[in-house]
Amino acid sequence: MLVRYLKSKGIVVVLLILTSCADTVKDDYVEQTVETLYNKALIEMESGNYTQAAISFDEVDRQHPYSVWATKAQLMSAYALYQTNKYDEAIISLDRFIQLHPSHRDAPYAYYLKALSYYEQISDVGRDQKMTELAMRMLNEVMVRFPKSNYAQDAKFKIDLTRDHLAGKEMEIGRYYERKGQYLAAINRFKIVTEKYQTTTHVPEALHRL
């Protein structure tokens, strides 16, 4: 009976502790107005504290999901993530924004920022060019979807740079084959440059090596 009594008391104590902890968590969480939360996030953004700004903008969306400010906060959070080089997280946030608000007036910017998130991850020509191809695909989508937007011209400029980057990769592979005496394989690579990337800076060298 004593054991049973102590066990019951133990359960009561545990319950009291859990209740106390729950109350503490509840007390720590303070719901704030959407204006207060958004302005706090903006101040953090302007001070360069992008990591905290992203968290604060997410809090706007969490506490006030149906507010017009929540929509703005989703995009601002993605931008803050982009500024901290968290490109994969930024892309996820931007995909969510685009899915939820495909006709929003800031949709062109969302597509553009997504393209930049890929573009900033382009590696040197000696590495895998998957990210380069993704960047070019997204930049092209910006041009096709929003040809009259402010972002189309910059997207075109970056596409040209991206194409030059891909051509550089083909040239590097071609030179490698050439050094190894695999001349047919080298020629095929140089032809890709002259046929697929005619406007790039690598064409003169490719023609010379052919």
Image: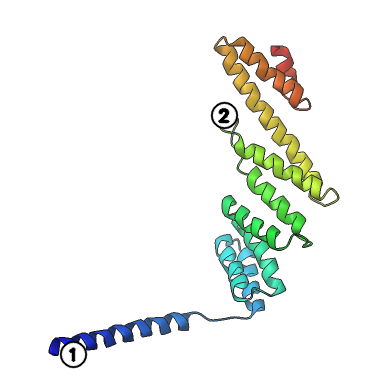
Q: Residue at image x 59%, y 50%?
A: 87
Q: Are marks 2 and 1 in contact (CB under 8 Å)?
A: no
- Measured in 3D between alpha carbons, the distance from the residue under mark 2 to the one under mark 1, in whole angstroms, is 72 Å
* Label disc, if present, on residue 48 of the rendered structure: none
* Quadrant of the frame with the C terminus: top right
What type is the residue that disc 2 sits on?
Gly
> Which residue is at the far left?
2
What type is the residue that disc 1 sits on?
Tyr
Q: Residue at image x 59%, y 80%?
A: 32
Residue 30 in the figure: left or right of residue 11: right
* Quadrant of the frame with the N terminus: bottom left
Sequence-wise, the earlier of marks 2 and 1 is: 1
Looking at the image, is 88 positioned above or below residue 101? above
**Image coords of residue 104 (percent x, y):** 77, 62
> Does dot 2 land on a helix, a strand or a loop?
loop
**Image coords of residue 200 (percent x, y):** 75, 27
* Label disc, if present, on residue 126 of the rendered structure: 2
Q: Residue at image x 59%, y 72%?
A: 62
| Residue at which label 1 appears | 5
> Does dot 1 land on a helix, a strand or a loop?
helix
- Estimate how packed mark 2 is, as few (under 14), some (14 to 19) or many (20 or more) residues with alpha carbons within 10 Å: few
Q: Residue at image x 60%, y 43%?
A: 121
Q: Residue 180 appears in which quarter of the rendering?
A: top right
